[in-house]
Image (cartoon, rainbow, N blue to C red):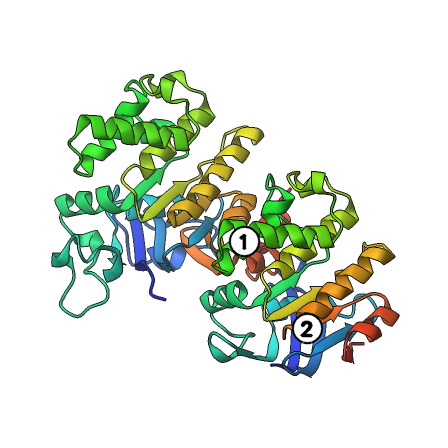
Amino acid sequence: MEPLIRVRGLSKRFGPGCDRCLDSTGPEHDTNVCPHCDSVTACSDLSFDLFPDEALGIVGESGSGKSTLVRLLHFEWEASGGSMELHRGGAAALWPEIFADQDQFSANLLTMSQFQKRQIRNALMGIVYQNPHLGLRMQVSSGGNIAERLLGAGWRNIAGMRERAAELLERTEIPVRRMDEPPCNFSGGMQQRVQIAKALSNKPLILLLDEVTTGLDLSVQARVLDLIRNLRREFKLSMLVVSHDLGVVNLLCQRTMVLKSGRVVEEGLTDQILQDPQHRYTQLLVASQL
Amino acid sequence: MITVDNLSKNFLLHILGEKRIEACRAVSFRVPPGGFLGLSGPSGTGKSTVLKCLYRTYLPTGGAIRYDSAAWGPVDLATLPDRAVIDLRHREMGYVSQFLKVIPRVSALDVVMEPILTRNGVSREAARQRATRLLEQLRIPRHLFDAYPATFSGGEQQRVNIARAVSWKPRLLLLDEPTASLDRGSVEIVLDILKEMRGEGTTMIGIFHDTALLESVTDSVYSIC
């Protein structure tokens, strides 16, 4: 089976950078700050495939580059290097211009124009942030939040958008009679579910989940995870699940990648990562789990 | 069907000052299609390790695990890429652990239905029927079908575990002490189910604590010591 997206050599550096940045940072130095020029190598040379209907886990401590990865893939930040390519099956009909004649994969999405990136993002991706303030306009009604996303994806009919918003809110267990209330009136768990509804509104192929259960209390965490599990089965989504919680990736993901100081230190089947971790850091991570 | 050749597994524990633990070494055996091999040996000799290497929960350190898969032809499970292992686990390779490890907040019936639904391409109703039949056969009381197995007794959990593992009829089934926490009556029922599956051609490799049991259900035994 061919991957849905192919990511190669993805890197992000903050600061001027120098010749010694790459050799002086990384897991063996336990830092991503270059001692010679103070530049931060947030991530370096990340390569992976995401397959259709697959949930890939990304774990690592804070500062390991997990969120950087998500922001680069969501085109929020400009990558310093590397490529992200889309398989023909995912999108060839929408943007024939990004596929060269016979190639199975598109040109590098990361170097496309802002306009094209926005189009691709609106049509293919959904994102749920740890902090609902990043994903939602807190003062705008929940229905309006979803409508905004639908407008971006090309919807124009108000009644149709309202109907779709109601359907999604119901699916994510938000009472539809509250769809005209702004998310700032809602509890943390409800805000997270509005974010999920919004992320799913354009029927994305790829859902990016950035620490979606972090900071929620246990019973609410459980409901959000149940929801994600059910939605994945129903919509056959490909997901990138970023979490520092091994329990979350164990529940949702078949494969997992472990990041440390901006580098991949290990990747494998999730049960193998948890029961037979190879890298020193992964062993520490697994041994530290409660 | 499956040929294990000189399999070894060491754990290198970096966080314990590079401590090396040898879990098994020089394990070699063959299981013909439809065969049932038992693994025997005192506890701590690496029986579970061997099964986990076959299922690739552990990465083998050395040796080869040649498996004639239906989907991919002959493969070496010791070095097969992750994605292919996931595919084999999905299509043909089942594993019964010593303890039930299920997704929280999923009912017993759904736990057993889930692999049938995702693997066998049957309707919800057909999956429900098969799951119900299995749970009844394993004497799980009907009023527990919609309860969460996490709250069940040890024996009930293990029976749900077995129902889940056999429900979708895998082609190769790895069994790690499936009868350890069961009473005599339940053991008999489980053995009947395994016999039925063998009748349908499933190849099995299993660990049983009880040596008399081991010898009665398997058709050959490999001793690890």
Q: A279 left or right of A73? A: right
Q: Where does residue A18 sit, x and y in percent of width and height?
A: 28, 54
Query: For the residue carrying disc 1, how many other residues have a C-alpha within 10 Å: few (<14), some (14-19), or many (20+)?
Result: some
Q: Quadrant of the C terminus of chain A?
A: top right
- Which picture quadrant has residue A176? top left
Would residue A130 appear left or right of A103 to someone viewing this image?
Answer: right
> Which residue was labeled with disc 2?
B198
Could you say which is closer to the camera, residue B67 or residue A164? A164
Q: Residue at x 57, y 57 (%)?
A: A271
Alpha carbon of mark 2 to alpha carbon of mark 1: how far? 22 Å
**What chain does mark 1 sit on?**
B
- Pick the residue in front: B203 or B145: B145
Closer to the chain start, of discs 2 and 1, is 1
A116 on left or right of B4: left
Using the rendered view, name the quadrant where residue B190 is placed.
bottom right
Residue at image coords 30%, 43% = A203
- What residue type is disc 1 on? Ala
- SS for tag 2? helix
A215 relative to B205, above or below = above
